[in-house]
Image (cartoon, rainbow, N blue to C red):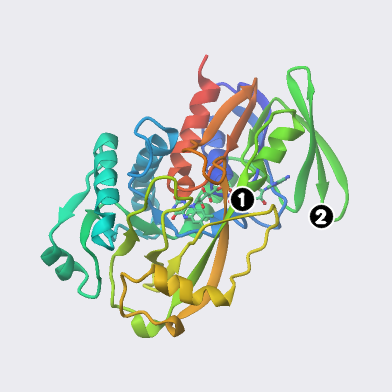
Amino acid sequence: MEKAKFESGVVIGAGVVGLAIAAELSACGLCRELWVIEKEEGFGRGSSARNSEVIHAGIYYPPESLKARLCIEGRERLYALCRRHEIPCSAIGKLIIAVESRDIEDLQHLQENARSCGVTLQELSLQEVARLEPSLRCSAALYSPLTGIIDSHALMRFFYREAVRNDTQFVFNTAVTAIEGRGDRYGIETVAASGEPFTLEAGLIINAAGLHSDEIAGLAGMDYRLHWCKGCYFSVSQDKAGLCSHLIYPAISKGFAGLGVHLTFDLSGRMKLGPDAEYIDRVEDYSVPEHRREAFCAAARYLPFLQPEDLSPEMAGIRSKLQGPGDPFADFVIRQDRPGFVNCVGIESPGLTSAPAIAAYVKGLLTAA
Ligand SMILES: Cc1cc2nc3c(=O)[nH]c(=O)nc-3n(C[C@H](O)[C@H](O)[C@H](O)COP(=O)(O)OP(=O)(O)OC[C@H]3O[C@@H](n4cnc5c(N)ncnc54)[C@H](O)[C@@H]3O)c2cc1C
């Protein structure tokens, strides 16, 4: 246990990132007192509860980027955590496919990028594809054996329990509304759902407020701008259960806002399609327009057995992106922008996979001289 460097610290946001950080920091004794402030009535109600629950291998991002490095490290840490603490997960593997022959170039770019990142993707012959997924239609495919699925709620419960076991105080139903510097400390104003205000002081702030992390940084005079990008999911009728057994992702061209409408599973084997990608105004609207059923079915033309009536609106999530429409790649921002003030901004996918590595990275920022 290290000597406490901070009398008190506050993590803003109890999504998977804030929870992983709280578990990590509370275990190493960097703060004498650690608080997590969350505006919702419980943990894991934001993007962390509205995603594909995929443990990514780390193949899509520029090799030296934080997204690539923390995804690869996070994936290894996640599988180890799951093994050690019986958190449900399964390394079911993923096929990345060129649906038409014109998509093969995108697949080759991905293969090169994965190689530069040090991640293995196996080239499959069409006979091997047919053996693995007889119902799939594609022109070429790569196989990622390291990709899997996880019960994200069980993971968050684990981090929450670890943090509580190490005396972290969770304050739910309470939003951070103002932050001011007070010498080497920060004054943090909060308002509870009942309307009751409360101010606390801390030498350390970790901003893990997801979609609102740019606003939290803004409260302390730091300038970030997030773009919100919504992704809807449709569940696939149980009649079609068992027709596929791997995650299936189409190859995407550079600059696409998501990873393409893909086929995922939860741990009970239920299939879902999604997410699409639509930049939206800053409104937390999680409705799934039923009329998109046809568009989803068309996007998943690599699954010829699917009919629009097999799909039912399931849920939506919103990505917090530093990359606006048409912008080049934007990396995670995980930075100590002011002494004792760490911003985690733009933690979109692969944020779930990266969470334990992000937590270790934040600890590293704070323990560095
Ligand atoms: C559609 C979609 C699919 C995805 N699929 C995957 C995937 O398969 N694999 C993967 O690795 N990643 C995936 N991701 C990314 C992953 O879900 C996110 O990176 C991760 O959940 C971000 O966690 P977080 O803790 O930063 O944010 P959140 O989970 O959003 O948590 C932030 C918390 O801060 C709280 N908060 C905000 N403002 C305040 C305030 N003022 N005061 C107090 N509390 C506040 C919020 O209520 C919220 O609980 C996906 C994301 C989306 C949207």
Residue type, numbered disc 1: Trp
- Up/down of 143 relative to 233, above or below: above
Return the mark for residue 307.
Answer: none
Residue at position x 34%, y 59% in the image: 249
At x 50%, y 37%, the residue is: 330
Residue 93 in view of the camera: no
Hey, which residue is sitting farthest top in the picture? 369
Residue 9 seen anywhere in this rendered image of the structure? yes
Question: Which residue ends up furthest to the front in the rendered image?
Answer: 102
Q: Which residue is mark 1?
A: 228
Among the 4 quarters of the image, the one containing residue 138: bottom left
Question: Which residue in the protein does label 2 denote?
Answer: 193
| Type of amino acid at the residue the image marks with label 2 | Ala
Tell me the quarter of the picture where residue 165 sits. top right
For the residue pair 6 and 266, the one nearer the viewer reads as: 266
Mark 2: which secondary structure? loop
Location of residue 151 in the rendering, given as x and y in whole percent from the top left corner: 44, 60
The numbered mark, 1 or 2, whose residue comes first in the sequence reads 2
Above or below residue 207? Residue 86 is below
The residue at the point 69 percent across, 48 percent down is 38
